[in-house]
Amino acid sequence: MHKTLTEIIKNRKSIRSFADKPVSNDIIKEMLQKSSRAPSGGNLQPWKIYIVNEKSMKDFLQFQKNWKGKEEPPYPIYPEKLKEPYRTSRNQMGEQMYSLLDIKREDKIGRLNQMLKNFDFFGAPVGMFCFIDKQMGLPQWSDLGMFLQTFMLLAVDNNLDTCAQESWSLKQNCVKTYLDISDDSILFCGMAIGHANMDDKVNELNTPRRPIDEWATFIE
Ligand SMILES: Cc1cc2nc3c(=O)[nH]c(=O)nc-3n(C[C@H](O)[C@H](O)[C@H](O)COP(=O)(O)O)c2cc1C
């Protein structure tokens, strides 16, 4: 039975451990094509996408392991002094994940090793990188979000799993060098794409949302 849009939205969640099961570029291409129906201000379609899969995934991961170049993260992933309630939500998410994995607060190495799994695409067979031209501003960055969410929902529709990864922005020089991308572009994020390994506890994480009355106001 085909899933409804509501079911697809409810079923999407970030997956941080993938099964060793390939995904063809044909299906990724079809999903990208459909994702480009996402709206964008002035129909600019400001996304620039690169996919690594199979041979290029192996090559890239090897290149990355050997990378000794300097990194200059292109944007701060979070504001420096994150206000409430955002700070609490962020901390809760981290604590929820580490307690599921039984990695204690004092276990800095354990936490770091978990974070570093980002740079292996959590074992996913396919990796996506999403760039944007440096010329673009906040409205166009928000267009990327719509494109990426459309893609992540289509992934669920195709029985695939994803994790968006801002962490790749910390390695933007490495990624740009491997892909031979000019300085006109900024790496917004990466994305791991594949089939969830449901034997890994990390994938049991279900993140809560703040109640609607805290962020939506209906004016009488
Ligand atoms: C743009 C973007 C970047 C993200 N970057 C990372 C990341 O680098 N590493 C990671 O483990 N999760 C990352 N996430 C996943 C979020 O932590 C996750 O979406 C959030 O905790 C809500 O959980 P859910 O996706 O399972 O609903 C990112 C999500 C988005 C939308």
Image (cartoon, helix red, strand yellow):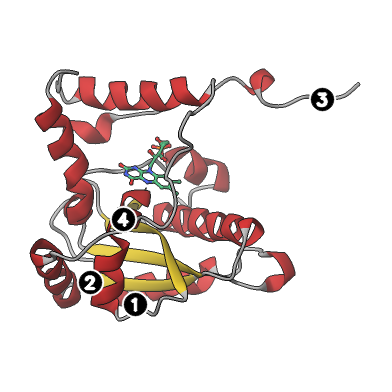
Counting residues from the N terminus, which is met first, the one under dot 4 or under dot 2? 2
Q: What residue is shown with label 4?
A: 168
**Residue at image location 36% in from the left, 55% down from the top:** 73
The residue carrying mark 2 has its beta carbon less than 8 Å from ligand 1: no
| Separation (CA) of disc 4 from disc 2 | 16 Å
Q: Residue 61's x, y, as percent?
A: 14, 65
- Residue 59 found in image quarter: bottom left
Looking at the rendered structure, the kind of residue marked 1 is Asp
Q: CA distance from mark 3 to mark 1?
A: 44 Å
N-term-proximal mark, 3 vs 4: 4
CA gap between label 3 and label 4 equals 38 Å
Is residue 36 among what the camera can see? Answer: yes
Which residue is under mark 2? 53
Identify the element where label 2 is drawn. Answer: strand
Location of residue 74 with respect to 16 vertically, above or below: below
Q: Foreground: 201 or 45?
A: 45
Return the residue nearer the eye: 30 or 7: 30
Badge 2 amino acid: Asn
Indicate which disc residue 212 carries.
Answer: none
Q: Regarding ligand 1, which quadrant of the image does it lie in?
A: top left
The amino acid pointed to by label 4 is: Trp
Residue 116 lies, in percent from the top left, at 17, 45
Q: Name the residue beneath numbered marker 1.
A: 26
Q: Crowding near pointer 4: few (<14 within 10 Å), some, many (20+)?
A: many
Q: Is mark 4 within 8 Å of ligand 1?
A: yes
The residue carrying mark 3 is 218
Position of residue 24 in the picture relative to residue 212 (left or right): left
